[in-house]
């Protein structure tokens, strides 16, 4: 699928294909959200002061 | 010397039928002692994905506080005052952060199937809080008293009229939208969020799929 980048006069940059029309700033915000979500899953949580992972290991 | 044992006086019997006793038992029944503000959590909570619920609440707190300050000065003061500009920006960006962390919280709970373990109502209150927040944000964009809010209102009224609620929810009436934004919808969000948090404390955090929940 081919995406075309167009310029709406003074209204920012948009990605458009058929009925889809989305501003690049919104695309960036969505990508940052997804990156934040993935980072929250893979980045290890800091350990507690007592050397534990902060939770109750049962 | 011989040690003497002093017997503690017996607690007076509870007054059956007293409204305070009934209310106390009801509150303790909803969230048992120790669960409201626990100091220990299961090991699986030590993950960043569990942080986003609290981050959403923290952002909501800044949204509410900055909104209270904004409302004190009227409906246009933030256009002409340096302090107003600052508080207006604080309100806007705390809302942006609120929705960003809320969405990550929502994704995390969706992929964790957070409605498991009798948590269906917890999930649904979260969804209703999200919908109420969207409505509050929309009415907020209608009350910024600038050309953008005018344009959004003019576009929105056609959509609202097409589903037959334009007379009841008139986007072109700034005073009405202001009241929805600063009173009605915040009260709705406050009640639902409080209910959501109480349910989270009552049932505990949802374990990851495959993890064993401590009893």
Image (cartoon, coloured by chain):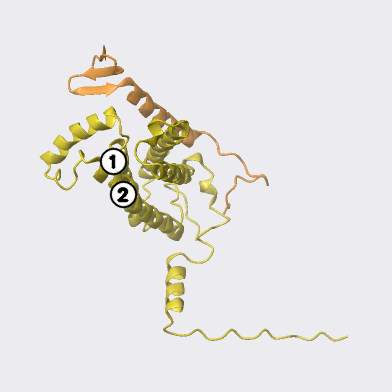
* Chain B, colour shown: yellow
Q: Nearer the viewer, residue A32 or B58?
A: B58
Q: Position of residue B198 (x, y in %)?
A: 42, 58
**Looking at the rendering, in which quadrant would you find the N terminus of chain B?**
bottom right
| Residue in the picture at 28% in, 39% down | B138
Image mark for residue B185: 2
Residue ID for mark 1 = B139
Say which residue appears at 41% left-offset and 35% top-offset. Answer: B88
Farthest right residue in view: B1
Tag 1 subunit: B
Who's orange, chain-wise?
A
Q: Is residue B140 above or below residue B79?
A: below
Bin the neighbour count of mark 2 within 10 Å (Cα to Cα): few under 14, some 14-19, many 20 and up.
Answer: many
Q: Position of residue A28 (x, y in %)?
A: 37, 24
Badge 2 vs badge 1, beta-carbon distance below 8 Å: yes
Q: Is residue B200 above or below residue A52?
A: below
Q: In front: B154, or B52? A: B154
Question: Measured from the top left, where is residue A32 in percent x and y?
Answer: 41, 28
Q: Decide if residue B44 is in sight here.
A: yes
């Amino acid at each position: 699928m081919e995406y075309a980048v167009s310029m709406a006069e003074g209204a920012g940059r948009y990605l458009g294909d058929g009925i889809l029309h989305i501003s690049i700033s919104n695309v960036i915000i969505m990508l940052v959200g997804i990156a934040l979500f993935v980072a929250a899953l893979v980045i290890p949580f800091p350990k507690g002061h007592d050397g534990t992972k902060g939770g109750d290991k049962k | 010397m011989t040690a003497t044992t002093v017997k503690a006086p017996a607690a007076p019997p509870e007054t059956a039928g007293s409204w305070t006793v009934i209310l106390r038992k009801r509150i303790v029944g909803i969230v048992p002692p120790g669960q409201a503000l626990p100091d220990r959590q299961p090991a699986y909570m030590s993950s960043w994905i569990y942080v986003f619920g609290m981050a959403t609440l923290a952002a909501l707190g800044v949204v509410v506080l900055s909104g209270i300050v904004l409302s004190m000065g009227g409906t246009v003061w933030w256009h002409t005052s340096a302090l107003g500009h600052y508080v207006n920006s604080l309100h806007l960006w705390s809302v942006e952060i609120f929705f960003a962390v809320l969405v990550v919280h929502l994704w995390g709970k969706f992929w964790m199937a957070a409605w498991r373990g009798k948590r269906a109502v917890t999930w649904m209150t979260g969804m209703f809080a999200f919908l109420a927040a969207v409505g509050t944000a929309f009415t907020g964009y209608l009350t910024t008293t600038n050309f953008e809010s005018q344009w959004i209102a003019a576009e929105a009224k056609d959509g609202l009229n097409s589903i037959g609620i334009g007379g009841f929810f008139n986007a072109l009436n700034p005073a009405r939208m202001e009241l929805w934004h600063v009173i009605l919808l915040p009260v709705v969000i406050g009640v639902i969020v409080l209910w959501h948090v109480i349910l989270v404390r009552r049932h505990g955090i949802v374990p990851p799929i495959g993890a064993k929940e401590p009893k």
